[in-house]
Image: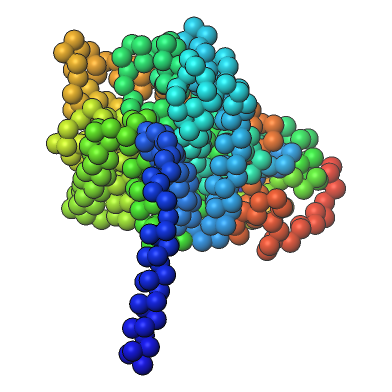
Amino acid sequence: MKRKIMTTLLLISYATMSEVWAMPDASPPTVSFNIDHIWVLLSAALVFFMQAGFKAFEVGMVRAEHGNAVAIKNLIDWIIGSLIFLFIGFGIMFGKSSYGLIGTDLFFGIGVQDNPEGSGLGTIFFLFQIAFATTALTIVSGAMSERTGFIPYMTASAIVAVVIYPVFGHWVWGNLFYEDNPAWLADLGFIDFAGSTVVHSIGAWVGLVGIWIIGPRLGRFDSHGNPKEFKPANYSYSVLGLLILWLGWWGFNGGSQLALDGAVGDIILNTNIAGAAAGLVAFFHCYWFQNRKDLYPKFLGGIIGGLVAITACCANVNHFGALAVGLTAGLVHNYGYDLILYKLKLDDPVGAIPVHGFCGVWGTLCVALFGQLGPETSRLTQLGIQALGVSVAFVFTITVSYVMFTLLKKTIGLRVSPDEEKYGIIIGGEANMGEEEEEMEMSEEELLQLMK
Amino acid sequence: MTVHQISIKIKSGYDLISVEKYREIRPIERVQLVSQKKIKFLDVEGNMIPTLAAIKDINKNLHR
């Protein structure tokens, strides 16, 4: 038996080697590629994968009966957001600027690839930015989940993708595709490297107005305004989502360098340091100083809050700076969480506002507090510029969102029916799962007498 | 059961209003909402209260 195996191996070896010896002497074919393009494309894929993270995180945080609707809404968010951003949003954000206010070309993706004046990344840059835009939309979806109607939500989402996100984005990142484009906040010196404000706070402020106008989920607060316990579907599912998000953040922040150079490693390491430090602080601060109240959501939200905070300054701080950003972001998150739920009595089922709003603002300010600045700019001056940027983002987003949600509320109604809310929203149909139609046994005249 | 909030159908969606906001609607419009089954009265937990009982409860609290 052994002899047979040895003979077979020898024959195979001889056949293989004789083929190699018989081949003419030729060098392997060469493929030309640009490592920066590959890195940004990979980063775009990682940021796209964050959609799966958001989906898992949110589905775990809402009540079990709403999981399906939240997941479907996230999926449609990506579909609508990516198409609308392709057709209109990208041009408004990155097109040739009109007075530094809005972009005026690159609509429908025309002129993105091989544009002699534009970014050499071309379509890859475009793909990367689509993934960013839909991240902002998903934040709104999480904050307003469990009670928002499908049509009004999608209408709002489309308006965010066409107006709010790209217009403010143009003011900060308008010079990323055309380098000579004026972008008035960027020109003032405002720094938001990967979007603590441009992506995260914008999404959070839209969500803030949304949850204020639509009101809390039915039964979330008792008659005295105290929050009642709503059991999340599955925290372990949220942890899976968080880990996917964390991985995606490597691309979110690392890819924002738009090149694979020596800084990318530091950027990703800073991202990890801040996320870990924020999670640690959020956990133990809640454990020791807040009576372990809402410990799990604060722990998970704290980690994401750290990742959000470092997003603006990951390219400007050293590793100790990243640690400082993360440690403080954990506290900002926990106090922000209590402010929203217990003081303002707003219902944010996934904790999107403290994570993306407050930690986004804090991270943007940290550019001035912990970042390495040029010799010509003092920390105080930079802090003023950063504060101006986050204030403009807040006022602009709150104003447009208020008009948008008020119009939607008055015209088509923002909420689902009480039945749908109670039994889980069914997209595309009206739920009627328990309550029977009530028959009125009074005439209209009798009713009117009763109501006067 | 005390009426805490009121759900009103608007086109394809719904709006949730307080009892005070409901009282600001003209009585004739409120009657139409009831006749057209576009209104649901809810307690603090979101459970539905029968219309007649809800209207009487609102009146009772108003005159208290």
In the image: residue A354, left or right of residue B13: left
Residue A245 locus on image (x, y percent): 38, 48
- Numbered label tally: 0
**Residue at the bottom extreme, as displayed:** A1
The colour scheme applied to this rendered structure is rainbow
Name the residue nearer the viewer: A337 or A7.
A7
Residue A79 is left or right of residue A280, and the answer is right
Which quarter of the image is occupied by the N terminus of chain A? bottom left
Please indicate, yes or no, whether residue A383 appears anywhere in the rendered image: yes
Measuring 42% from the left and 11% from the top, which residue is drawn there?
A: A180
Which quadrant of the rendered structure holds the C terminus of chain A? top right
- The one nearer the camera, A367 or A46, is A46
Does residue A441 appear left or right of residue A293 in this picture?
A: right
Q: In the image, is B23 to the left or to the right of A286?
A: right
Residue nearer the viewer, B52 or A307: A307
**Eyeballing the image, is A389 above or below A312?**
above
Q: Is residue A312 above or below residue A385?
A: below
Residue at 28 percent of width and 32 percent of height: A261
Residue A335 in sight in this render: no
State whether residue A410 is above or below residue A275.
above
Q: Where is residue A280 in the image (x, y as percent from the top left)?
A: 21, 50
Position of residue A167 measured from the top left corner of the image (x, y, whole percent): 50, 20
Seen at 35% across and 53% down, the residue is A243
Residue pushed farthest left? A320
Residue at 61 percent of width and 59 percent of height: A423
Residue A150 is situated, as x and y percent measured from the top left of the image, at 64, 44
